[in-house]
Amino acid sequence: MMSRAPQLSTASAQKYEM
């Protein structure tokens, strides 16, 4: 999950997590 989400954006990571 987190591997796909951009590490530079925490807010964007939340989208991928959902």
Image: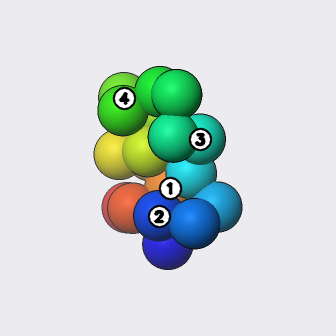
Q: CA distance from mark 4 to mark 3?
A: 9 Å
What residue is at 43 percent from the left and 45 percent from the top?
13
On screen, 18 above or below 8?
Answer: below
Q: Amino acid at mark 2?
A: Met
Marking on residue 11: 4
Labels 2 and 1 touching (C-beta < 8 A) = yes
What residue is at 50 percent from the left and 56 percent from the top?
16
On screen, 5 above or below 6?
Answer: below
Q: What residue is disc 2 on?
A: 2
Q: CA distance from mark 3 to mark 2?
A: 8 Å
> Mark 4 or mark 3, which is nearer to you?
3
Q: Earlier in the sequence, mark 2 or mark 1?
A: 2
Q: Earlier in the sequence, mark 4 or mark 1?
A: 4
Q: Tell me the SS state at disc 3.
A: loop
Q: Tell me the SS state at disc 1.
A: helix
On screen, 9 above or below 3?
Answer: above
Q: Position of residue 11 (x, y in %)?
A: 36, 29
Q: Position of residue 5 (x, y in %)?
A: 56, 51
Q: Earlier in the sequence, mark 1 or mark 3?
A: 3
Q: Position of residue 9 (x, y in %)?
A: 47, 27
Q: Residues within 10 Å of mark 3 (few under 14, many from 20)?
A: few
Q: Amino acid at mark 4?
A: Ala
Q: Residues within 10 Å of mark 1 (few under 14, many from 20)?
A: few
State which quarter of the image contains the C terminus: bottom left
Foreground: 7 or 14? 7
Marking on residue 7: none
Q: Tell me the SS state at disc 4.
A: helix
Q: CA distance from mark 1 to mark 3?
A: 9 Å
> Mark 1 or mark 3, which is nearer to you?
3
Q: What residue is disc 1 on?
A: 16
Q: What residue is disc 3 on?
A: 6
Q: Residues within 10 Å of mark 2 (few under 14, many from 20)?
A: few
